[in-house]
Image (cartoon, grey):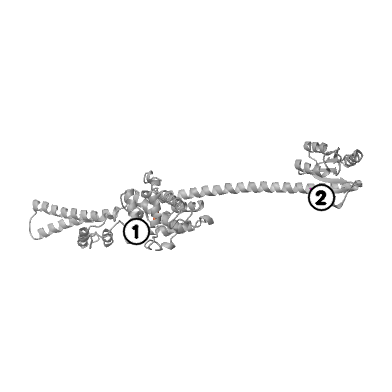
Amino acid sequence: MPLTPPIPILIVDDEADLRELLVEALADQGYGAEGAQGGNQALDRVREKHFPVVFTDLNMPGGLSGLELLRAIHDEDPRTMGILMTGYATTEAAIQALKRGAYDFIQKPFKLAEIEASLERALDHYRLRQENEEYQKNLERMVEARTQEILGLKNDIERLFEGFVNASVTAIEARDPSTSGHSSRVADLTVGLAEAINETPNGPYGGQHFTPIQIREIRYASLLHDFGKVGVREQVLVKAKKIEGERLESIFQRLHQRTLEAMRDRMLDAWSRGIPFDPDRMKDLTRQQEEEARHLLELIRRCNEPTVLPQDAAQELDQVAGLSYQHWTGPDRPLIEPEDLDLLRIRKGSLSAQEREEIQSHVTHTYRFLRQIPWTSELAGVPDIAYAHHERLNGMGYPRQLKDPEIPVQSKLMAVSDVFDALAAADRPYKAAVSVERSLEILEQEASVNLLDPEILRIFIEARIYERIASRPWGNP
Ligand SMILES: [Fe+2]
Ligand SMILES: [Fe+2]
């Protein structure tokens, strides 16, 4: 509040003449001057109204002394500036007065000009102090407003980012619906595992503690760990059999054509040797050819399954390699193209080495994608954590064949969650779901050969982290 005239000034003195003289003189100068004859009366006035400046006599008979009054006024209204007046001035008294909070010290008898000069200095000081306080308050208000603004912005950014992560997860899972929910289940498991590690007092991870922001980093890395699958061709990503779709259809069609060709050749051969048409012989021939065709078809179907290739089927495939049919352009061509034979010869799973490599490239795609995001310094580890989720302790992982000390601990947690979910989820194209008990056994086998971290797996099992997603139907995020 700026000072506006008449500025209230209080004069406290038991000498009525002097008091009245000062009140009048200051009133003439335009001040709202008032008098009080002693400390108690002065305090009553101060309680009723704010006086920027109070002049007080030092020695007043009975009641408070000038110094005591100034202290009492300070307790009531710290903004008031006190000026002491006394007829018994000593240097010591002046020092004491100033030490105890008086703004100025005036010796009686004084000239009016001295009072006016002291009052003006006091008021200048008062204004300056007030301006400072106002400035301070403004600054605080501005800082508070900016802080709220920044917090709001931070919340907006966080919400925006959550939305972006969720949209990315939706994009991954839309390309491969069979792994729907995998990303968020891996995130839940890995976060649960990190929290369980925080609770572990001893062992190799006894000293490991993840802060809330590190847990968030783990969550983002887990949600986005397979994002790179968007860079893998869909037919490879969702491939359930070794040969699929039109390619398989075309083999069956060629097989059928080969059967007809064989019958035609045999009939032509008979006729060329003068043997007349015999319906019974024709039926017999048809039956033989169809039986052979059925056998071949069954063989191709058996070999096309992603389960372990039976030895006898593998040997029989070698014989099929020599079979041919007549292409419409004239020359004979292999019944099964060499690349299809290679696929059928895959010993386990549905993917060729090249396709497997393509699937594995998802990790590098994930890393390249995540590296492009300008993470805050606290979340800067997200790309590296996700990059190492298929690395294995013994160096048998991919894509960099890192070994134990080089693999971030967060990635080791994620590896356990990822493998568990891949096994226990019923939704992979390659295989049926494995029971929780069997999945944990497989994880233990992997830990025993130093693929997964045995201590992390122990915590995963002991803290029953896997139960976090057990109540959730597989395939639902
Ligand atoms: Fe992966
Ligand atoms: Fe995964």
Indicate which disc, 1 or 2, sits on the residue closer to the N terminus: 2
* Residue that label 2 marks: 96
* Residue 366 visible in image: no
Is 120 placed above or below 271 here?
Answer: above
Amino acid under label 2?
A: Gln
Q: Residues within 10 Å of mark 2 (few under 14, many from 20)?
A: few
SS label for mark 1: helix
Where does residue 202 sit, x and y in percent of width and height? 44, 55
Q: Residue furthest left?
A: 275
Residue 448 numbered tag: 1
Residue located 51% across and 52% down the image? 213
In the depicted structure, whether residue 269 falls above or below residue 46: below
Residue 71 seen by the camera: yes
- Residue 91 inside the magenta-drawn segment: no
Mark 1–mark 2 distance (CA, rounded to whole Å): 84 Å
Give the left or right position of residue 112, taking residue 328 as reference: right
Q: Residue at x 25, y 57 (%)?
A: 309
Give the residue type that dot 1 points to. Answer: Ser
Q: Position of residue 280 (x, y in %)?
A: 8, 51
From the viewer's side, name the closer residue of 250 and 374: 374
Which contiguous range is marked in magenta? 95-100
**Residue 424 location (% of width, % of height):** 34, 49
| Foreground tag (1 vs 2) | 2
Left or right of 333: which side holds 58?
Answer: right
Indicate the quadrant where residue 44 lies: top right
- Which of the pair 364/382 is nearer the observer? 382
Q: Is residue 363 above or below residue 34?
A: below
Label 2, secondary structure: give it: helix
